[in-house]
Amino acid sequence: MLALREQSALDTSLPNTTLAPTRKWTLAVERWALLQLRQLALRSGRITPEARHIATGKRGEFEALFFLRAQGYRMAERRWRTRGLNGDLDLIAWDGDTLAFVEVKTRTRHDFFAAESTINEAKRKMLFRMARAYTHSIPDWEKDPAPVRFDVVAVYLVRGKVECILTRNAFNPGLSASRVNQPSFGGV
């Protein structure tokens, strides 16, 4: 796969179209436009600034969404919630015929422990309950269920660069997790 050129944090130019296939270029333009619209809304006062940790988490989910789309995932839901259960499912997507519930962990530096290792047993149980509630909300799920798995995307926003690490089958006991380590589209 061809990679898009990396962009610095202040680079607002469009990606180089000669280096990327049409699909990747389209995703990069969409990502760039949404980032520009957010900056404009912040400057104009249409949205208020958030606490740094909240903004970092939302930015990580944003980057993970575009990273997964570039990997071929088809997005179904973002920040899905239901009554009666605390928490949310960061991203729900189809990877081929498999429904993937994706937890996103964002960090602004590389620590001794990987970001995905911070998901403890209580968080996993909450994710399982939320996933069960989501699948029960799908009409005819019981008649024709699809394979389900839990993935984790660790997003590192370090020194103006975005790095995404995908761990497939992160929560399935007895299954080996496969990792895809590829940089995302560019700068922060």
Image: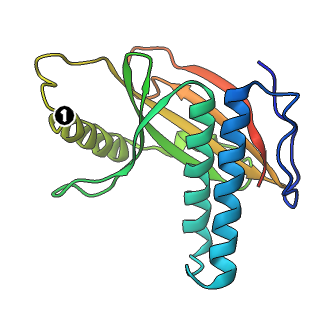
Q: Is residue 127 placed above or below 142 in the rendered structure?
A: below
In the foreground, 141 or 173: 141
Residue at 65% across / 65% down in the picture?
37
Residue 157 placement (x, y as % from top left): 73, 52
Image quadrant where residue 160 sits: bottom right
Q: Is residue 19 placed above or below 48 in the rendered structure?
A: above
Kind of residue at disc 1: Ile
The residue labelled by disc 1 is: 138
Q: How crowded is mark 1: few (under 14 residues within 10 Å), some or many (20 or more)?
A: few
Residue 185 appears left or right of 125: right
Residue 2 placement (x, y as % from top left): 81, 22
Residue 50 appears left or right of 77: right
Image quadrant where residue 124 sits: top left
Residue at 54% across / 67% down in the picture?
54
Query: Helix, strand, or loop for circle 1?
Result: loop
Query: In the picture, which quadrant includes the N terminus?
Result: top right
